[in-house]
Image: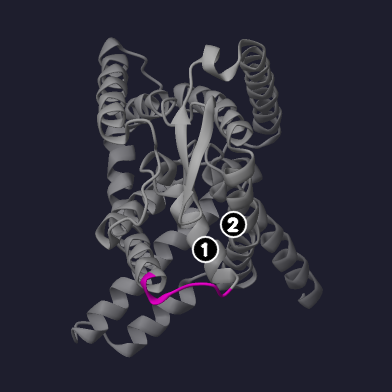
Amino acid sequence: MIKKNISLSLTNYAYGLVLGTAEIIPGVSGSTLALLLGIYDDFIELLYQGTELVKYILLFFLKKKKFEDVKKQFLTIRLWPFGIPLVFGMFSAVLALSSIMTYLLLNYTSYLYAVLFALSLPTIAIIYRQIKKRTFSNFALTAVTGVSLLMVFINFLSQNTNVYQPHPLYLFFGGLVAISAMVLPGVSGSFMLLILGLYTYVISLISQLTHGSFVMSDVINLLFLVAGFGAGFLTTVRLLKKAFASYRDQLMAVLLGLLFSSWYILWPLVEVTEVIHDEPVLSKLTPTEFGLPKSFAFLVSIILLAWIVDKLHHVLDKKQKPVDDGFDRL
């Protein structure tokens, strides 16, 4: 029994490494991989039981629940051998890869964005396949969402898509949106941070903290980001359950529009004009400015990578037994 628990713990830690790696790379969905690995139900159940525990603790302080009730709820959480190893694996991956992603953003910006652009293509295919009723109204919703967000990105983000020294409240909002996206198959929290212009800052912040080179303002910003994670964890995860139950196709249509509009953010033909606070200032280029031969090579590589990822997803999807999406647990 002990050997079995150790084996399961190591397996779940490995799953956590996979999910954490996926969540730190924009365009790769940890939830989609959890679905393919067959642990999505357990992952959603873990999130739900976590929100229930926090609710019970709050009710305990309000003297509406007894300590025995809190203890009973705590014991219902499958912490071992699933929860703790999985979460520890996810945190390990995020801490280990933050410095690597910062290095790639500074030194191989165009190549990294080309990979992310390529990954968005099969992600769009995944979301599209989840729309059961492909009606005109749903596609109209996709078009309206995509065009509206594209106009927002163009008008407010201009050439550069990074936000430098963001306000703590904006970090709170970013954390709330990111944690909400994390539970949706096909979309990752890091992808939402990238769209909001916060990805580079957050990755750089985590990298600085892991190396011990930070100031008090960094700690304050991190606390606001974590508070946003917590708020999203306690509220929007449950709201998404209702949206999935009653408006699944419409929600998928909105996500589809979001992904199409994100191509402006992920445009790979860029150059780093300067670096501010360890964050690259990017300038978007036309294929002519970037170089036609190199632009064509990027296009071919993007299509090839997208095709490989899509085929890989099909193979894994066929091997995986059909499972519930997990949202009935919330």
Residue 290 left/right relative to 244: right
Which kind of residue does numbered mark 2 sit on?
Ser
Q: Relative to 3, say whether 290 is above or below.
A: above
Identify the image quadrant of the C terminus. bottom left
Which kind of residue does numbered mark 1 sit on?
Ile
Residue 134 spot, x, y in % from top left: 37, 15
Q: CA distance from mark 2 to mark 1?
A: 6 Å
Q: Residue furthest right?
A: 3
Residue 100 spot, x, y in % from top left: 65, 53
Whether residue 19 appears in this view of the structure is no
Residue 323 spot, x, y in % from top left: 55, 40
Q: Which of the two residues, 141 or 81, is positioned nearer the viewer here?
A: 141
The residue positioned 47% from the left and 54% from the top of the image is 44
Give the magenta-colored segment's residue range: 212-217
Q: Label 2: which residue?
A: 98
Identify the image quadrant of the N terminus. bottom right
Q: Quadrant of residue 294?
A: top right
Which structural element holds mark 2?
helix
Which structural element holds mark 1?
helix
Q: Relative to 262, say whether 243 is above or below.
A: below
